[in-house]
Amino acid sequence: MSQSNQPGAAKRIYYFSPGHTEGGRSLRDVLGSKGANLAEMTGIGLPVPPGFIITTHCCAEYQQNGGRLPAGLMDEVRAYLARLEQETGKSFGAGTNPLLVSVRSGAAVSMPGMMDTVLNLGLNAESVAGLARATGNRRFALDALRRLIHMFGDVVMNVPHAEFENAFTAVKKKFGVTHDTELDAEGLDELIRAYRHVYRKHAGRNFPGDPMQQLELAIEAVFRSWNTARAVAYRRIHNIRGLLGTAVNVQTMVFGNMDSDSGTGVAFTRDPTSGANDLYGEFLIDAQGEDVVAGIRTPQPVADMRRWKPELYRQVLRVKHTLENHYREMQDVEFTIERGELYILQTRTGKRTGPAAVRIAVDMVRERLITQRTALLRVPPNDLDQLLLPSFDHRARRTVLTRGLPASPGAASGVPVFTADEAVERASDGTKVILVRRETSPEDIQGMHAAEGILTSTGGSTSHAAVVARGWGKCCITGAAELQIDEAARRLTVRGQTLTGSDIISIDGGSGEVMLGDVPKRPPVFTDEFRTLMSWADRTRKLVIRTNADTPADAKAARKFGAEGIGLCRTEHMFFGEQRITAMREMILAEDEKGRRAALKKLLPFQRRDFEGIFRAMDGLPVTIRLLDPPLHEFLPQTPAAQQQMAQAMNVPVEQVRRRVEQLHEINPMLGHRGCRLTVTFPEVLEMQVTAIVEATINCRRRRVRALPEIMIPLVGVDRELALLRELTERTIAEVCRRRKFRGVLHVPIGTMIEIPRAALTADQIALHADFFSFGTNDLTQMTLGFSRDDIASFMPGYLEKNLLDRNPFQTLDAVGVGQLVEMAVTRGRGAKPKLKCGVCGEHGGDPESIQFFQSAGLDYVSCSPFRVPVARLAAAQAVLLNQMDLFT
């Protein structure tokens, strides 16, 4: 029949129909997610219109051929189209009982709205007349044609969407109607003429009347859409890699806009915002699916189907249960009703908010649909951030401007911006922005990502804006119909009040309220489902999860989130503050050791008090305290005016300040006089800090607070550095205990940060003087790759775009390079000292992919910022489960 049946040739087209279905979800990489699910649903008996799928391999071949369809592919398409004609009893493009088809994209990973779709293919003058006769509805046939010209022109020929909209507006105005559905057959005739003119003007040719030419051009357009800017950006944002391309799904058209007994809708088998086990979605009567998804018309809640067509609503509920029992996952379903008959056009795993992901996973375990292991793997760790999002303080005064539909939860404030480009530009300057649009489209993807929240005047809870926002955990309100948006003038008007980009608005994605000003927010509240999921994670994981915290408030917050200690307490942050910074600067300006010790004596009580507060917050849990790390120049002002102010405050000559700043200046301070090098030069600094730690520990122990300090010496690269400073640390601990008459046993582990490549290479020597290693992966990454993390913005986007690197190495650990040093240090360190404790305290400690590496490298703990602790707990559990899966594959 076709090339795909020749010996040795890869099958290029797969067919699906109630009578014969090829493929299913096991062929997702070949058929794409959409095509695989169409075949799967057909196979389990759901009412799916028949069609065929052109594989992702053909897309890859199209790209490799420089944008040309694979040889012989259209011959195969014709053969499968003939099979479709035979099955449906219709003829493609014929004047009698015409067959129309849709052409849709579909990659192995769902990318909602990012690639192209064309509906109603096969219409020309002859088939429009035939469709009108077959349905007895000429208006419907004309409406199908105007939709085809618009969509085909926009998608295939890049005719500006606004040109079609302007033509439609003009015709509606001429015929005195407001809504699209009010235009009669005569009006549609005129609109089609206007559309043909727009098409010819911008495409430079007439709209094609040959149905096969329409189909071929549409297939090419879908393949082309794989590499559009929006699709590439979506894959980059979601870290989607390694796919061949998109499949093309050619499917028999069914029509929700045929009459008042027809309709279309999108439904989620569970609420994608809260996770409640309720059918959630929207539908429109007498409409096509694009009207719902694109937000062109504001739809009705799917529950209202009970009043419109009760039996159809019951059918949709049965489909919900069938799909969930089959896929054992929440589904996002598109359906169409043609003259009272239900058809399912698509199902895919539904995108959901973080709170919904947690609730659905836990509920499905309780419903015995999935296991606890599956539930743990099903929730993306980064989505837990959304459970930690603030909400608006209910006690705060609110000036509510209007209300829309609560499409994605959260609380966001910012200045309104009216285009995606403006959102990106202003957000890049640090301005918090709310993207305000009539409706969003895939072209807005970068602006949506840059915005704090999204607000639209049309659309519903399944529109493009809502689906994308929920997937990102971004606050979103849709369908705020009272908003009058003037994109050109960059302003919006609501109830007579005009707002511009200099005003601040707040949006509540949970209530749908749009408010004036920056409304105060409050911290989140954990749900029972969250606590349940975390308990499963804690029973599964092997890594201990600590936090990076420098204040008692941070320590308390981290402990609330489940931290099991502090892996990094940065002491330098404690030196800022009016009285402290003055004493610190006195120490830096001092000409001799006596002067430095006098200044350090003033700092000692502050340090001791800080440590006592942290020890109380972490009562019974270990606290790893890093001794002074940054270069001293960071504590001195750099501008002449600030230097003058410092000199006056300290009653010293300004020249003394300037001279000391010049003395401390370094060409490359990150590799200069910092870390352990400071305390080698100025041992009195170490003595003061260790004294403060030990005195705070003794004070706490005497108050029955179980303080468990660990002292970490930073930036060690030579074993003799650590040997020298360990001896000084131990001597200071002993002296303080003697002086304070502490009679108990005070064991304070002393370790080092592994952040210099030489330290990793000589870890066996360094381990002889260390009780623990803590990998400072930020500096280790800098020194291994030769990248300054403060200066990568100028080239890192290009590196990622050109696939020179898979990830930003400061966000996800470079396992191939930096990872080798980590593994080497762990192996060599434990070779010298088998019970050596190893952890990580860089930002990578809160990155799920990096945590998976740390698990495999044999680390004992990871440490991350307080709000990343739940993420790390779940990621650590997933690392164990994924490692077990690898062992059995």
Image (cartoon, rainbow, N blue to C red):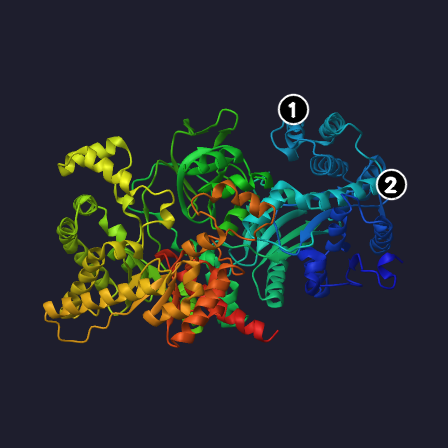
Is any atom of residue 570 visible in this view?
yes
The picture places residue 278, in percent across and down from the top left corner, at 51, 59
Is any atom of residue 274 visible in this view?
no
Label 2: state its secondary structure. Answer: loop
User: Within the image, what quadrant is residue 557 found in?
Assistant: bottom left
Label 1: state its secondary structure. Answer: helix
Picture residue at 14% right of the left edge, 38% below the top: 650
- 273 on left or right of 753: right
| Front one among 588 and 472 | 588
Packing grade of label 1 (10 A; few <14, some 14-19, many >=20) is some
> In 3D space, how far apart are the residues under numbered discs 1 and 2 (Cα atoms)?
31 Å
Labels 1 & 2 near each other (Cβ < 8 A):
no
Q: Which residue is mark 2?
A: 95
Picture residue at 79% right of the left edge, 58% below the top: 15
Q: Amino acid at mark 2?
A: Gly
- The N terminus, quarter of image: bottom right
The picture places residue 628, in percent across and down from the top left corner, at 27, 54
Q: Which residue is mark 1?
A: 170
